Every structure is written in C-alpha cells, then in structure tokens.
Image: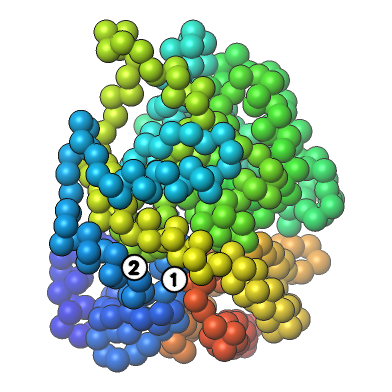
C-alpha cells in the first residue's frame, strides 16, 4: 500500500463499498486520465470499460470539453438560479428539448441522478394533487429497478441489496414483477415476444389505478440489476395503459440516455414519449454532477398560477443550473451533432457485438449474452441448462474485477454479470483488449476455482 492509499483509508469512506475489502485491495489512486485510459500514481494504466460508472462519453480529459469548461470557469462559475439565469443554461435547455422525445417541453435542474428522481416523484404527486386527483398518492415499483439511493429513489427501486435495510423508512409502493427475459417465466424471447410479462403491471394498474400517481421505469435496460434488457413492447403497453388511467409515466434515462443504447434516448426504441423524463450521467460526458428533469406541458401547466394559489414547485438545489455543468452539457450536445456520434456508436456497437460473440460465448459458464447499442453484458451461471446462478457469496464478479485490474482493464461487474459500457471513443483495438482480457480473467478464475 503506498502512502496515498494509507491516507485515503485513514480519511475516506468510499461509495458502495465494504471498507474492509480495501485492506486487501486498496483504492487505486488515479493521477490522470486520457481517452479510454486511466493512469495511477505508480504508472499503471487501465482501460475504463465501464465509463467510470456509466458517465464518460468521449474519453477522459477530452480537449473540446476541457476548453468549454475552462472558458466557462473564467467567465461565470455559478449564480443563484432562482430569479437569475445565464446563457449556457438557456442554450442547454433549448438544445435538449430539440433532441428529447417530442412532448418534452420544460426543464428543471438537479445535481445528480437521485435528485432528479426525487424531483420527478414530487412533481408527479403534486401534479395529481393540483388537478384534483387527491387519491393518487402511490408509485409503482418494478422488481429489479434502480433509481438511486435517496429515500424516494430507493422506495421506487426493486434491488433488495440496496433497499432492504431501509425498508421501515421507505414510502409504501405497489410492487410489480418486471421483465426477466433471460429467465422468462413465459418461455418467450425478448427479440420476438409481445411483452407477455406486462400482465403483472396490467393487473396492478387495473386494480389500483385510482391510487397510482406514476410508474417510473428504466427504458429498455435495468442497469444496476445487471443490464437486464427487455422488449420495447413492454414500454409501448405501459405508455398506453398509463395514458388510459391518467398515470404519469416517468422514464428514467439517467443510465441509458445520450446514445448508450444506440439511440439518443432509449424511449425512442419504443417510439414513446413519457410525461416526465430524468437524465444525468452522460449529460455532462462524465465531467460534472448535474441532472435534468424534462416535463410535458400538462405537468407544467398544473403548477402555473398566481403565487397565492400555492401551486408552485418549491424545490431547489444550491447548485441548480450550475454554469460549469451547463457549459459542459452544451458542448456534449454539440459534439453529438457535429461529430455524428450516433453513427459512430452504431459502428462500434456492431464491432463490440462481433467481438463478444466470437470471444466469450463458448465459455462454459456464459449463460446469457445481451446487448443494446454500446452496452454489452454476459451473465455467468453455474449451469447453462438450468440457468442456476452462482451464490452471491462467491463474489465471482468481484474476483474477476481484481484479475482484470492486474491486466489493465477496469471491468466492474454487477454481481455475476460482466458488462462492457466503454466511452464512445474506444477503438476496435481497445475493444479487442477489453473483451480478450475478460475471457482470460473468466478462464483464470474458473481454472483456479473448479
Ligand atoms: N437512475 C438510474 C437508472 C441509474 O442508473 C442511477 C445511477 N446508477 C441513478 C438513477 C442515480 O443516479 P446518481 O448515482 O447520480 O444519484
């Protein structure tokens, strides 16, 4: 352990970590990043195959974004956003509305994904109170959903690992079984099914619609649950039923937005437009903590009135509309437009698919392979036939992560799911290194643990 690592452990409590683990594998202290590479203080380099928790789009220390950030910092770093505004916020919101699903008309600011989810939940609840649907106080929580770590976000999530400890504190929700395509109880295939699994949602909505304010969903991919992908038909059915029963549809595009699935926003795969949409992560290309909540006119209109009616949305964050974040986000959207990023994603995701298919699928323990756009994932199972999972206590993903680090690749699996979600600037050669390394590490793990 080097001196910096010792000091780190003396003072820092890292996110989503059992700190005791760091005694064996201390936090890697990164000195700089360039492109897909991160370099630590000892000179070791790592390919960032998970875009540093799904945020980075165009590589570390990107020249265009650096410049935009520098220029903004030397002009205006921050200004209170109630009663004041600034050019970059205005430009950002105009640009985002142009590329968002049609129907998204107004933009609110948060400072991270979870705060955007809190805003979305509060907006939906208050909307229904203000349009006179006072019984609509409940949210639907889909199994395996993930929407962040704050209390509201945890309440509408469905990953027990993160939420079960806090159950007594969470708001009551209506639970629904979501899609589970790899272990589909209907024996269907996600490419060809008609989202038969929507049955559980349909029943919950039909039985409880008078009480339901919103359904929040990760469009196309449940990220934290292990990149679980499902049919766009599920979203189409959901949109239709939400409209029918006056339930707000909240699309959480925090992980899947900004091209990750091959489209600018994942809702486009189903051709739907939600009532409320949350974005963050790629919004600032991995530079600044910032989030946006986009709303349809009907939501906005229910809050618009004389002050005395007390219908305003009295929610704020100190850093709402932060100019540094806005300048970076504007540059991100410009890069998308000027550098044809969606075309690049199309080409690179095809190559990623080819490479995974030719390199990993013959491994005895690779049960499922799923990919949409630049997100590819394999699920390791004990038995391919029965799809029996490895016990979580084996921490297979974590052990493969350790092996990959030694070989210079940052793969941070989700349980027994190893996934690839690299920055879009990754080259074919770098994709080869990442996927070949994954194979070597999986083989090494299993040959030592038979
Ligand atoms: N929603 C989704 C779909 C996410 O993937 C995440 C983060 N992984 C969040 C919300 C929460 O975002 P943050 O970590 O910025 O609070």
| Viewer-side label of 1, 2 | 2
Query: Under tag 2, what secondary structure?
Result: helix
User: In the picture, which quadrant includes the N terminus?
Assistant: bottom left
Query: What is the CA distance from the residue labelled 1 to the residue labelled 2?
Result: 9 Å
Q: Is residue 260 visible?
A: yes
User: Where does label 2 land, which residue?
Assistant: 65
Image quarter of residue 385: bottom right
User: Where does label 1 land, which residue?
Assistant: 58
Seen in the picture, residue 193 relative to 203 is either above or below; the reply is: below
Ligand 1 within 8 Å of disc 1? The answer is no
Q: Nearer the viewer, residue 143 or 216?
A: 216
The image's colour scheme reads: rainbow
Query: Under tag 1, what secondary structure?
Result: loop
- x%, y% of residue 163? 44, 43
Seen in the picture, residue 129 relative to 7 is either above or below; the reply is: above
Within-10-Å neighbours for mark 1: few <14, some 14–19, many 20+: many
Q: Is residue 101 left or right of residue 386?
A: left
- x%, y% of residue 286? 37, 63
Q: Nearer the viewer, residue 1 or 122?
A: 122
- x%, y% of residue 271? 69, 43
What's the residue at 38%, 34% (across, down)?
119
Seen in the picture, residue 165 relative to 378 is either above or below; the reply is: above
Say whether marks 1 and 2 touch (CB < 8 Å): yes
Q: Nearer the viewer, residue 99 or 431?
A: 99
Q: Nearer the viewer, residue 1 or 207?
A: 207
- First in sequence, mark 1 or 2: give its number: 1
Name, please, the residue furthest toward the bottom: 43
């Amino acid at each position: 352990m080097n001196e910096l690592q010792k000091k780190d452990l003396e003072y820092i409590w890292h996110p989503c970590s059992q700190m005791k683990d760091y005694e064996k594998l201390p936090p890697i202290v990164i000195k700089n990043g360039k492109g897909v590479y991160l370099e630590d203080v000892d000179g070791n380099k790592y390919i960032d195959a998970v875009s540093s928790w799904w945020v980075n789009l165009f590589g570390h220390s990107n020249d265009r974004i650096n410049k935009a950030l520098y220029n903004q910092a030397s002009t205006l770093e921050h200004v209170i956003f109630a009663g004041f505004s600034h050019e970059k916020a205005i430009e950002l919101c105009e640009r985002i509305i142009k590329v968002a699903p049609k129907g998204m008309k107004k933009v609110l600011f948060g400072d991270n994904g979870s705060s955007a989810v809190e805003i979305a939940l509060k907006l939906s609840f208050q909307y229904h109170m203000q349009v006179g649907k006072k019984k609509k106080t409940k949210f639907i929580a889909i199994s395996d959903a993930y929407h962040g770590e704050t209390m509201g976000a945890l309440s509408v999530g469905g990953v027990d690992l993160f939420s079960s400890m806090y159950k007594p504190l969470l708001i009551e929700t209506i639970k629904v079984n979501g899609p589970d395509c790899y272990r589909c109880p209907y024996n269907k295939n996600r490419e060809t099914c008609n989202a038969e699994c929507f049955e559980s949602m349909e029943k919950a909505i039909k039985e409880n619609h008078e009480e339901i304010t919103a359904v929040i969903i990760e469009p196309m991919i449940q990220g934290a649950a292990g990149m679980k992908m499902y049919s766009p038909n599920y979203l189409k059915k959901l949109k239709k039923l939400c409209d029918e029963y006056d339930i707000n549809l909240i699309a959480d595009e925090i992980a899947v937005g900004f091209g990750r699935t091959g489209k600018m926003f994942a809702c486009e795969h189903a051709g739907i437009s939600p009532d409320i949409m949350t974005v963050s992560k790629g919004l600032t290309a991995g530079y600044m903590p910032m989030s946006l909540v986009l709303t349809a006119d009907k939501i906005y209109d229910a809050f618009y009135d004389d002050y005395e009616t007390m219908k305003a949305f009295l929610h704020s964050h100190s850093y709402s509309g932060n100019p540094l974040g806005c300048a970076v986000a504007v540059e991100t959207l410009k890069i998308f437009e000027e550098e044809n990023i969606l075309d690049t994603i199309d080409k690179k995701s095809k190559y990623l698919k080819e490479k995974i298919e030719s390199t990993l699928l013959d491994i005895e323990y690779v049960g499922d392979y799923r990919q949409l756009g630049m997100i590819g994932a394999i699920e390791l199972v004990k038995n391919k036939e029965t799809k029996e999972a490895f016990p979580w206590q084996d921490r297979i993903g974590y052990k493969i992560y350790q092996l990959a680090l030694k070989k210079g690749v940052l793969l941070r699996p989700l349980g027994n799911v190893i996934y690839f979600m690299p920055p879009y600037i990754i080259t074919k050669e770098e994709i080869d290194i990442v996927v070949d390394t994954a194979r070597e590490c999986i083989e090494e793990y299993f040959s030592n643990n038979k």
